[in-house]
Amino acid sequence: MPLTAIDLFCGAGGLSEGFRQAGFHVVAGNDFDDRAGETFAATHREAKFLPGAIQQYSADDFLKAGGVKAGELDVLVGGPPCQGYSVYNHQRGLHDPRASLYLEYLRIVEGVKPKWVVLENVTGMTSAGGGGAVGAILEGLKDLGYKVESRILKAEEYGIPQERRRIVFIGNRVGAPIPWPNPTHGPGLKPFVSVMDAISDLPVLANGEGSELAKYRTKPASAFQTAMRGDSKALTNHWAAKLSRVNLDRMAFIPEGGSWRDIPFDLLPKGMKRAKRSDHTKRYGRLRWAGLASTILTKCDPHWGAYFHPSQDRAITVREAARLQSFPDWFDFKGSRTEQYIQVGNAVPPLLGRKIAESIMGKMAADGPRELVAAE
């Protein structure tokens, strides 16, 4: 029997895609975001998508959608909306309604009784509300009979061309030790996957340019590009947002790897004219071909970070952001361009999801008899 997974707060399906690549059969997903759900449904046709707020669904609804009984599901994964904990939300804390959605995850765990659980969120969860949510998740899962641990994982250490930190919870009710994926990239390991490794084969665009179905500029120039292309002959979502005249004027002064500090004072945004040189270190930044990308957020807006292309005078496209998140090129994001950026930025990098899934599968294989006992 194939290993089964259900994805709560699935978004476009980054975590699901990682688990699918590892060999899991994703049987159901849920998200409140209609456009993200449209992307998930189109890219996970084997799964039943339940649209709308999770509060309207019972555990039985998910069991029925996934075609499994309580206690049979191999893993329940999910990433409750993280904006309540994000460092970009200056009023963050447990008072934010989005910050309590982990309780819905625990409610579904209680009814579905999966063998394994995986939960992901931003590292801001560790400090918002005094870290109360982290403790509540750990205690909540333990109260439900799960052995559980949490760690902060660095995406770049697993072959993702991006600086990204996320807290991950892994637990099980079968008595197995918690397996964590071993880093594969970094000092003493494989070299980090660079921006050039990730996107150098994509078509050249001017500010505001793009096409519905773009052809590749070159043959794959790295193992990462080969993996992202798969069997794709062309790619979607490769449109450059149209930047304002003043932002184009600012960009002209920013070299590869540069930032707002390279912009003449009279061209700086009013608020940044009061900034210290040590502040906003990546705002209005250009990516470096040989470096890692900044954390991909829900807006690839230059005022938020380093989202200018390394050598082309424009912001990075949805497809480039998706590459930097390790989404395969066949993954077509639905909705407006703004909605597409949100889906990409909110996602768990599929490659990180795959590494987590493979570590769990390895433990399942090693502890086969224990898994059989749990299923009985």
Image: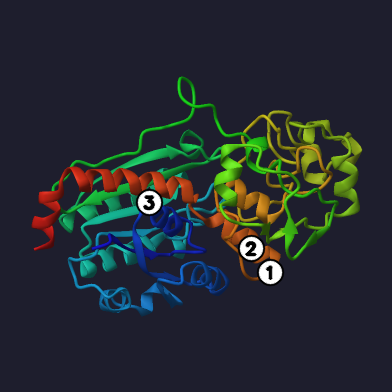
Mark pair 3, 2: CA separation: 25 Å
Mark 3 or 2, which is nearer the eye? 3
x and y, in percent, of residue 332 in the image: 60, 64
- Of the two numbered discs 1 and 3 on the same chain, state the one appearing first in sequence: 3
Percent coordinates x, y for residue 57 in the rendering: 34, 78
- In the picture, which quadrant includes the N terminus? bottom left
What type is the residue that disc 2 sits on? Gln
Residue on which disc 1 sits: 336
Label pair 3/2, CB-CB below 8 angstroms: no
Indicate how the structure is coloured in the image.
rainbow
* SS label for mark 1: loop
Image position of 25 (left or right of 258): left
Query: For the residue carrying disc 2, how many other residues have a C-alpha within 10 Å: few (<14), some (14-19), or many (20+)?
Result: many
Question: Which percent across, then down, holds residue 320?
Answer: 67, 49
Instruction: Count the numbered circles shown.
Output: 3
Residue on which disc 2 sits: 340
Say which amino acid is labelled 3. Ala
Q: Nearer the viewer, residue 247 or 157?
A: 157
Looking at the image, is mark 3 or mark 2 earlier in the sequence?
A: 3
Left or right? Give the position of 254 relative to 90.
right
Marks 1 and 2, Cα distance to the nearest angstrom? Answer: 6 Å
- Please say whether residue 158 is visible from this viewpoint: yes
Front tag of 1 and 3: 3
Q: Kindly indicate whether the residue at mark 2 contacts the one at mark 1 (C-beta within 8 angstroms).
A: yes
Tell me where residue 142 appears, x and y as whole percent.
19, 52
Q: What element carries label 3?
A: helix
For the question of whether residue 125 can be seen, the reply is no
Name the residue at 78% across, 44% down: 271
